[in-house]
């Protein structure tokens, strides 16, 4: 049932792509300056249609920043900030405040380093289990996992699991705890990633595009 519905949706949205995310640098700057992270705002390019100083950032920008960061602690911190900006856009007004909370958390360097190592080592459940920062929940720390994962595309690379994706999965009749056989969230997340990669392979698309499609649909899987 899940794959049948996904096949229909993949055909329907085959030409759709993820658009860049718009953000306002001046909204973020006061939250980042005290932590020496305001330079991350340069990742964006000015929006041609923005009337309030908006800039655009896209997933490819995160990948380039990741490749530049390597495993350097400051580089990982900058990548994390960029992920929070990209994930918040202009719709999540709490994003700057939550990012500042995370930057103020003394656990930040260790959490970013250990979860980066876990993700790149293929231990997604371990990464999920180890992530704990003030102001950052699953919707955002799985964005961090997806952004920091630099493994080959042939691996089951980390994917985002936020509320919109979850809403679409539930609408498809898929249950993470039933698929995983447990209510333990680290295992449920790893199971979700494995299932998404398996579906994507069967459907002839990439797993990150399929993840974006579920995000885009936001539970509206029965629309014609």
Image: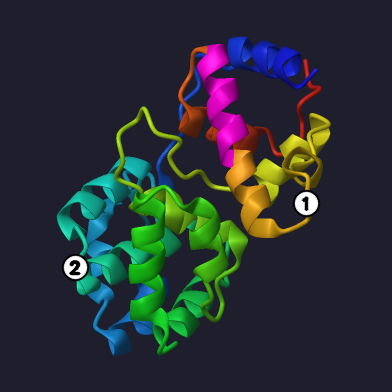
Quarter placement of the N terminus: top right
Element type where label 2 sits in the image: loop
The secondary structure that most of the magenta stretch takes on is helix
Query: Which residue in the protein does label 1 denote?
Result: 182
Q: Is residue 28 above or below residue 143?
A: below
- Based on the picture, tell me whether residue 199 belongs to the magenta stretch: yes
Query: Which residue in the protein does label 2 denote?
Result: 72
Q: Which stretch did the figure color magenta? A: 193-203
**Residue 169: quarter of image:** top right
Q: Is residue 183 left or right of residue 216?
A: right
Could you tell me residue 178's position as x and y percent?
A: 81, 41
Could you tell me residue 194's position as x and y percent?
A: 57, 35
Quarter placement of the C terminus: top right
Q: Nearer the viewer, residue 2 or 87?
A: 2
Q: CA distance from mark 2 to mark 1?
A: 35 Å
Element type where label 1 sits in the image: loop
Q: Residue at x 79, y 21 (%)?
A: 223
């Amino acid at each position: 049932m899940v794959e049948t519905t996904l096949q229909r949706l993949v055909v329907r949205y085959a030409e759709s792509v993820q658009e860049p995310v718009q953000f306002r640098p001046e909204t973020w700057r006061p939250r980042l300056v005290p932590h020496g992270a305001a330079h991350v705002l340069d990742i964006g390019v000015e929006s041609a249609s923005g009337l309030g100083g908006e800039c655009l950032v896209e997933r490819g920008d995160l990948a380039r920043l990741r490749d530049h960061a390597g495993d350097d602690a400051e580089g990982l911190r900058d990548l994390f900030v960029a992920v929070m900006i990209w994930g918040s856009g202009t719709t999540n007004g709490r994003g700057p405040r939550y990012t500042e909370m995370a930057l103020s958390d003394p656990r930040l360097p260790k959490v970013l380093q250990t979860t980066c190592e876990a993700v790149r080592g293929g231990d997604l459940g371990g990464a999920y289990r180890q992530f704990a920062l003030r102001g950052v929940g699953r919707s955002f720390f799985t964005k961090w996992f997806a952004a920091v994962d630099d493994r080959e595309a042939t691996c089951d690379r980390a994917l985002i699991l936020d509320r919109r994706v979850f809403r679409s999965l539930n609408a498809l009749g898929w249950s993470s705890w039933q698929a995983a056989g447990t209510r333990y969230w680290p295992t449920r997340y790893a199971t979700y990633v494995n299932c998404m990669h398996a579906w994507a392979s069967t459907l002839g698309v990439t797993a990150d595009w399929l993840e974006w499609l579920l995000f885009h649909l936001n539970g509206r899987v029965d629309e014609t």
